[in-house]
Amino acid sequence: MTDPLRADLDAIPRYVPGKAVPNAVKLSSNEVPYGPLPGVVEAIGAAAADVHRYPDLGVVRLREALAERLGVDFDRIATGTGSVALIGHLLQAIGVPGGEVVYSWRSFEAYPIAATVAGLESVQVPNTADHRHDVEAIIAAVGPDTRAVLVCSPNNPTGPAVTAAELDRLFDAIPERVLVVVDEAYREFVTDPACPDAIERYGHRPNAVVFRTFSKAWGLAGLRVGYMVAAPEVADAVRKVVIPFAVNVAAQTAALAALGAEGEMRRRVALVTSERKRTVMAARELVPEVPDTQSNFFWLPLGERAVEFAAHCEARAVLVRPFAGDGVRVTIGLPEENDALLDALRDFVEA
Ligand SMILES: *Cc1c(COP(=O)(O)O)cnc(C)c1O
């Protein structure tokens, strides 16, 4: 019974859910460890009384709040069930037969899947030796069939963010008919002043698209809310592709409540970035090649030993995310969780 199915979908890997290990230290999914922001649980409780009604189709209150916060027009914002879904919708909106999408590799695993589903060819540009986007090589990979360039900044899973100089160069070198998509899922964790806020710096450009999410710093991964900022025509096209009523009643209400707790979000992010500094410094004493990170995770370039290290951690009830033959991504957690990871790393390296 494969005849009716698209043969190109065979290339998409099956999703393998992470193992549930009771009471494990979970450093595998880039979540923030402090629970929902204040006011969020109450807002979801209040929204429960309305679940017999459809949600607001236009997601108006949330989009208005985002527009005000970001200083952009309301009609330039589109929302979806997480920015992963929304990236898929954008690629569907620009996918034409023979079209290509250019992005760094290794980068976010969702990109090749979303590209294939949208019928686009992936053109993957290897990262530099220090695990950063190779901006000149990305520019060189853009051709007549390129529909979009995806920039993941900070880059999941390797950690570095692109600088303003690099992004300026990219925007200036790439023709305006090609979208430059900046995925800023981890923007709130960026501390290097050389790395720009893409909405602020490039938002006015007609081919700029910036993705953000409530899943990471805002603590709503389980409710699935993401958004993008783009030119009105691009945002409008994506809103047509998004499944109607995608962002549900509880998610809309919770996202608004989270925005109301921005101060507490910032306080938590500061805890994460200070733990990041401490943990990465300690990890570098064991694995000196750990690259810079502007995110709430860091990269252990362990090569062929990546899977072995993840198994070593799991045996100690510490869950991390291996990429076979390449490296391991480790989320920054609570101080004692990071210590458990560092102990495991020390034993692994010194064994
Ligand atoms: C986590 C993540 C997202 C956001 O995912 P959601 O679907 O919003 O939960 C987007 N891009 C990258 C690179 C990520 O790591």
Image: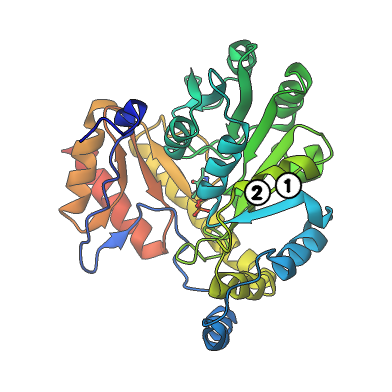
In the image shown, does 345 or 300 lie closer to the viewer? 300
Q: Position of residue 195 (x, y in %)?
A: 69, 38
Quarter-of-image position of residue 299:
top left
Residue 83 seen in this snapshot: yes
Sort mark 1 into few (<14), some (14-19) or many (20+) by Cα contacts within 10 Å. some
Which mark, residue 236? 1
Kindly identify the amino acid type of the residue bearing the numbered disc 1: Asp
Per the image, label 1 sits on a secondary structure element best described as: helix
Q: Is mark 2 within 8 Å of ligand 1?
A: no
Q: Is residue 38 left or right of residue 283?
A: right
Kindly identify the amino acid type of the residue bearing the numbered disc 2: Lys
In the image shown, does 218 or 284 lie closer to the viewer? 218
Q: What residue sits 41% from the left and 64% below the top? A: 334
Q: Position of residue 158 (x, y in %)?
A: 46, 35
The residue that disc 2 covers is 240
- Quadrant in which the N terminus appears: top left
Q: Position of residue 109 (x, y in %)?
A: 42, 37
In the image shown, does 148 or 265 lie closer to the viewer? 148
Which mark, residue 58? none
